Image: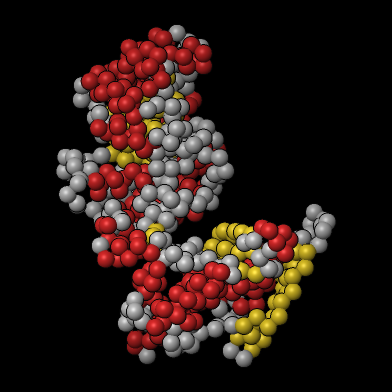
Amino acid sequence: MNSETKGAPGVELEILDTTLRDGAQGEGINFSLQDKLAVLRALDELGIGWIEAGSPGSNPKDIELFQAIREVKLEHARLCAFGSTRKPFVRAPDDPRLQSLLEAGTEAVTIFGKSWDLHVREVLRVDREENLAMISETIEYLVSRGKTVFFDAEHFFDGWKADRSYALATLRAALEAGASRIVCCDTNGGSFPAEISSAVAGAVETLGGACVTGIHAHNDMGLALANTLAALEAGCRHVQGTMAGFGERCGNTALAALIPSLELKLNYSCLPGGKLERISEITRRIAEIANVPVPAAMPYVGSSAFSHKGGMHSDGVLKVSRSFEHIDPSSVGNNRHLLLSEVGGRSAIAERVRKLDPSITRDHPAVSALAEKLKALEAEGWAFEGADAGFELLVRRELPGAGDVKLNRYRPLFKILAYRVMSEHPTGVSLACSHAWVKVWVDGQDEIAAAEGDGPVNALDGALRRALIRFYPELEQVRLTDYKVRVIDGGAATAAKVRVLIESTDGPRSWTTVGVSGDIIDASRSALVDSIEYKLIGDIERKIKTPSTEDCHG
């Protein structure tokens, strides 16, 4: 903890993650049942206290989820089902939506109700008293059935601005009915931190410490995190958000960007001891399940959160890390990246090379040679700042002793003897538009394979991996997760060189490689080959460092 931290040491906060409910409302996110179970397990691994698993009364998939959850053993998390207050003028025991919440079998239930008189008049179209009755009778009924009830005061901050006495009346109704947590929701995401602070202070005073007060912020003005911090300063002790920040419209408070600040800067306790170091890994895993990339610049957990490009910055952070880093990246499970470019300097190169050969210093001839090589390649259009795996292969090829993988050097594991890619347009509905044929050489043996794909690169990737799978079955787990093309010299029009970046994963690990050529297929081939070689060399090294049981006892 640095000297700038403040706050009351050890104050515990409740964290509720709503990725499976509010996060699932984000555009382009469509969780399968297995996806939801995987997210649930990931959040539990991190030590999240509460997980809002979905709305059992809203769709068959969530009903199926709550049935499946009963077979899942969780170590840390407790579960909430989410739903609304009873229907207008319907008895709570007669409302089928409330019955579905009870049937979900969760310890807690989150109920949302209206705190803005506009919604009472124009959306529910009931009078104020009926809305208060809907809140109180719903909560009383669920509490009587043994449920812990969280009340989400929907549109509380808009209600506070329009008629604060009525907004507070909805909170009192929830409190008197037995709600154990009352959550102030900035549902439209349109409030400023000062407004949040004032309204939360009013809510805390009204509730008088009789229950836990919470905050649920949306990011429509880019202020969800700031508004959450303002609410905490005003007395909230329960925080809701989604781990990676995605959700309806502009998303929710990103817990991965919030929790490290709370723990490392403000001395709050949010996760069990030792779990914070896994927050980068877990956030990326959840984003991968959702098929939504973690923004590179996302604080703490993004791939650029601790990236340094300028030579002076790289040199400075290596000498005194806090000169350009506000925390140790390892405290959140992230890594420092010294970006390789013509402005990066020899310190950045030397730091990367030392990971392969600790004996090499900044003044080693190999570092100077690599710096010159890097400048020459960048003049041709290559760029390695976003392709760590590609740069590592470049280092392996250039360092003395190339060919000996035991010395962390490069050794070619296969060779493409020939390849052909064809595209057909137009195509029939049942036909792929591209086909590829590849002939490879591995340890004196030839292998030929073909594949079809949705495009030439997809077909080439399929054919290459099919040809190699007999020799390297571990490639079954590898898939491409991102493909980017950049035109290097737009003035050359269709004759311009292109730079291709390919991101690949085998599940636990992800890596990026680069290729440059005047031919987009050839640039893609170069990046694909590097991607596969990086995977294979890494697997060989891990086997060398961690011998199998047979190796140890044979």
Left or right of 530? Residue 135 is: left
Q: Is residue 543 visible?
A: no
At x 68%, y 68%, the residue is 518
The image quadrant that residue 540 belongs to is: bottom left
The picture places residue 273, in percent across and down from the top left corner, at 23, 53
Q: How is the image coloured?
A: secondary structure
Left or right of 460? Residue 479 is: left
Left or right of 182? Residue 377 is: right
At x 75%, y 67%, the residue is 435
The picture places residue 210, in percent across and down from the top left corner, at 21, 24
The C terminus sits in image quarter: bottom left
Q: Nearer the viewer, residue 213 or 418?
A: 418
The picture places residue 322, in percent across and down from the top left corner, at 26, 57
Q: Is residue 221 visible?
A: yes
Counting labels gives: 0
Residue 440 drawn above or below residue 554: above
Left or right of 526? Residue 326 is: left
Q: Nearer the viewer, residue 300 or 347?
A: 347
At x 60%, y 64%, the residue is 500
Q: Nearer the viewer, residue 250 or 384?
A: 384
The picture places residue 107, in percent across and down from the top left corner, at 34, 37
Residue 80 drawn above or below residue 400: above
At x 54%, y 47%, the residue is 32
The image quadrant that residue 351 belongs to is: bottom left
